[in-house]
Amino acid sequence: MTSSIDIHSHSVPKGWPELPGAAPNPWLDVRTEKDAVIMIGSKEFRRIDSSAWDAEVRLADMDADNVERQVISPTPVFFSYDKDPAEASAIARIFNDLSLEITAEHPRLISFCQVPLQDTDAACTELERSIANGHIGVEIGNHIGDRDLDDEGVVTFLQHCASLGVPVFVHPWDMANSPRLNRWMAQWLTGMPAETHLSILAMVLGGVFDRVSSDLRIAFAHGGGSFAYWLGRMDNAWKHRHDVIGTSEHPPSHYVDRFSVDSVVFSPWSLRILVETLGVGQVMVGSDYPYPLGERPAAAVVRDAEYLQPADRDRVLRENALTYLGLTTEP
């Protein structure tokens, strides 16, 4: 059976130094050797276990799921985009160096760094430092406050990533908060897909794909949100309200080969929409490991998709990821 390459997982170090900047800052309340809680000041953010920091636990789960290699990205709560750039740079250095401690002895684990995206120069500097130290790519949040991915500073950073051949993974974060969204985990069930959809739309209608080299290898989490499902609606609007949204050189469907998405959609029929709309070459396995809303076993939705031909299934399971990550077939 073909193994998979998982491009979407996260880590949390087992503790870190006190972070610079005004409180509240994230810290880790370690309860036992296997259990801990990410705290934001005095507020509980997320319960985690040793799979977040213990490479041996992670590798055992990868073996159980037939995962050949796994990309480990920061947990977005650590991005610190609201802090002073110098403080955010220091925080990025802390978490990037700790991430390499998890992956350094294990070639099957691939580390993506974080950067202080609110400051373009600082982000480029930390990217270069991290790549030199052993990171393979970078994870960024899908927005910085009200600045989306078509912001000039972000575009410059993406151009730098393209010039260096560094893959970019975009993850939703900092979802809107309201009484309507605070029920039923609605921030995760509707906010995350909506944020991701909006960010791809910003790259299209904001002209980013027209301005950034096609050398840019960029992927979006959670199946790209609802973008693939509503592509026809966006094309229709581009044609009939061109006076408002004719801000890209081509309609949105023209750009579907410029980005990839992961497979964290949980239903073979949802996966089919991605494959048929974006193309089989634009979809890669993601699990969101080790969090409880992730997929276990990883790649189950791809393996259960009976409509995929064997060659296409292999592309989604691992070959597309090899291209995206710029890797050879051997770990």
Image (cartoon, rainbow, N blue to C red):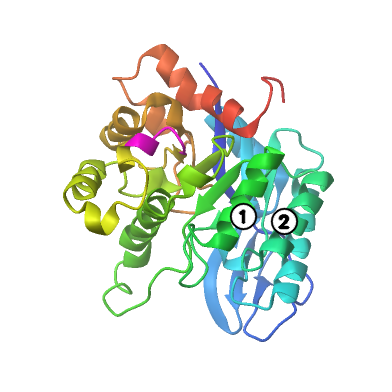
Query: Circle 2 sits on which residue?
Result: 124
Q: Magenta residues? A: 254-259
Please say if 1 is above or below 16.
above
Q: Earlier in the sequence, mark 1 or mark 2?
A: 2
Q: Is residue 282 magenta?
A: no
Q: Can you give x and y, in whole percent of width and height, for residue 169 in the image?
A: 56, 47
Q: Nearer the viewer, residue 313 or 236?
A: 236
From the viewer's perspective, tell me whether residue 6 is left or right of residue 283: right
Residue at image x 79%, y 72%? 17
Q: Indicate whether 183 appears above or below 241.
A: below
The overriding secondary structure of the stretch rendered in magenta is loop
Q: Tell me if I can see residue 3 in this picture.
A: yes
Q: Are marks 1 and 2 in contact (CB under 8 Å)?
A: yes
Residue sitting at x 80%, y 56%: 97
Left or right position of 160 against 198: right
Residue 38 lies in quadrant? bottom right
Look at mark 1 in the image and give the residue it sits on: 156
Q: Is residue 185 visible?
A: no
Q: Secondary structure at mark 1?
A: helix
Name the amino acid, label 2. Cys
In this view, 259 is above or below 241: above
Q: Position of residue 18 (x, y in %)?
A: 77, 77
Q: CA distance from mark 1 to mark 2?
A: 9 Å
Mark in front: 1 vs 2: 1
Q: Nearer the viewer, residue 289 or 124?
A: 124
User: How many labels sit on residues?
Assistant: 2
Which image quarter holds the C terminus? top right
Q: Residue at x 71, y 82 (%)?
A: 21
